[in-house]
């Protein structure tokens, strides 16, 4: 009776420990899922803001000299610009277009900003797709190398966007397009009688959002280590022992080593041990598996 009571107490303690471990594992998985959802959302928002600001021409707004039309200048697009008419005269086109070639962009700073913005947008969109598909297997995001590459890509995209937003006003110096729209007083970081458009603000917002999003992989790497068992492996490792198993172990704890091998080994290995040693456990006939333990 005392042995049965001790076995029941041990089984109850093991069950309580199992329940606590399961609750801890569920809470950890829930926190990891929340971090993943926030990371995907912020990465998608920063990518959309940066891509929209990059593709739209409303970065600098002003009026061209000699006309009352409002013109917009972007990194590679412009609206209301002088163009050659079919009769050979120069007329003011009232639509939006882009530069025909990369070298037609009127400032080297604008060309560098174009390369930086395109690189950042590609990185953010690729990272968003990877994070979205990694939600099917969040264990991928606990690998140290994967989380490091994702954090580096997030930080690099933020750096590229912020640097492009700084290079754009630096390119106003000796820029013929800016001189026509904003007047001769325009220069580096001086817009003359022009003002910044909302697309420029949107691109800067994308850069700052991307910089803030770096906190998500940092928090994930700090609070969720790489070697954390998932739900299925945890179940395999923490199987509770039944009372009859504990009683069986107690009864056969003081057996001889070769008898413990026979009791614990699988049937095939136990029979091979019988043949090598020339002996059989009690209750088993030679060459037959008649033991009450299944041998």
Image: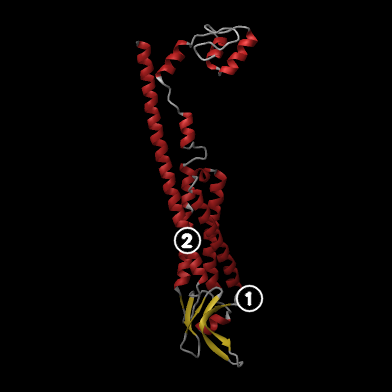
Asked whether residue 185 appears in the rendered view, the answer is no
What residue is rendered at 44% in x and 72% in y?
A: 198
What residue is rendered at 48% in x and 11% in y?
A: 252
Asked whether residue 264 appears in the rendered view, the answer is yes
User: How dense is the environment of label 1, judged by Cα within 10 Å: few (below 14), some, or many (20 and up)?
Assistant: few
Q: Secondary structure at mark 1?
A: loop
Q: Position of residue 120 (x, y in %)?
A: 55, 62
Q: Position of residue 17 (x, y in %)?
A: 39, 28
The residue identified by callout 1 is 101
Q: Earlier in the sequence, mark 1 or mark 2?
A: 2
What residue is rendered at 41% in x and 44% in y?
A: 31
Q: Secondary structure at mark 2?
A: helix
When the figure is inspected, residue 15 is found, relative to residue 175, above or below; the finding is above
Please report contact status of discs 1 and 2: CB closer than 8 Å, yes or no: no
When the figure is inspected, residue 259 is found, relative to residue 94, above or below; the finding is above
Q: CA distance from mark 1 to mark 2?
A: 28 Å
Q: How is the image coloured?
A: secondary structure
User: How dense is the environment of label 2, judged by Cα within 10 Å: few (below 14), some, or many (20 and up)?
Assistant: many
When the figure is inspected, residue 41 is found, relative to residue 184, above or below; the finding is above
Q: Position of residue 158 (x, y in %)?
A: 52, 60
Q: Position of residue 164 (x, y in %)?
A: 54, 67
Q: How many marks?
A: 2
The residue identified by callout 2 is 46
- Quarter of the picture containing the N terminus is top left
Closer to us: 65 or 3: 3
């Amino acid at each position: 009776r005392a042995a049965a009571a001790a076995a029941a107490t041990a089984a109850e303690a093991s069950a309580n420990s199992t329940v606590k471990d399961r609750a801890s594992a569920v809470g950890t998985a829930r926190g990891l899922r929340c971090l993943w959802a926030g990371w995907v959302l912020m990465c998608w928002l920063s990518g959309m803001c940066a891509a929209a600001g990059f593709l739209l021409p409303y970065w600098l707004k002003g009026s061209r000299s000699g006309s009352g039309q409002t013109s917009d200048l972007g990194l590679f697009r412009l609206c209301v610009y002088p163009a050659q008419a079919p009769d050979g005269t120069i007329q003011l086109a009232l639509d939006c277009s882009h530069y025909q070639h990369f070298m037609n962009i009127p400032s080297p700073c604008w060309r560098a900003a174009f390369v930086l913005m395109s690189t950042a947008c590609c990185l953010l969109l690729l990272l968003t797709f990877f994070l979205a598909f990694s939600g099917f297997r969040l264990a991928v995001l606990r690998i140290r190398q994967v989380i490091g590459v994702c954090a580096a890509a997030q930080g690099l995209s933020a750096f590229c966007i912020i640097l492009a937003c700084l290079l754009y006003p630096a390119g106003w110096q000796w820029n013929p397009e800016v001189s026509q729209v904003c007047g001769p007083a325009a220069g580096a970081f001086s817009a003359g009688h022009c003002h910044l458009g909302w697309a420029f603000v949107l691109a800067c917002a994308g850069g700052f959002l991307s910089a803030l999003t770096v906190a998500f992989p940092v928090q994930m790497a700090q609070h969720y280590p790489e070697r954390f068992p998932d739900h299925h492996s945890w179940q395999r490792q923490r199987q509770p022992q039944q009372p009859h198993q504990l009683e069986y172990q107690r009864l056969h704890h003081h057996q001889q080593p070769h008898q413990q091998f026979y009791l614990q080994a699988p049937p095939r290995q136990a029979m091979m041990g019988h043949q090598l040693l020339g002996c059989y456990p009690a209750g088993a006939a030679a060459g037959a598996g008649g033991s009450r333990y299944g041998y």
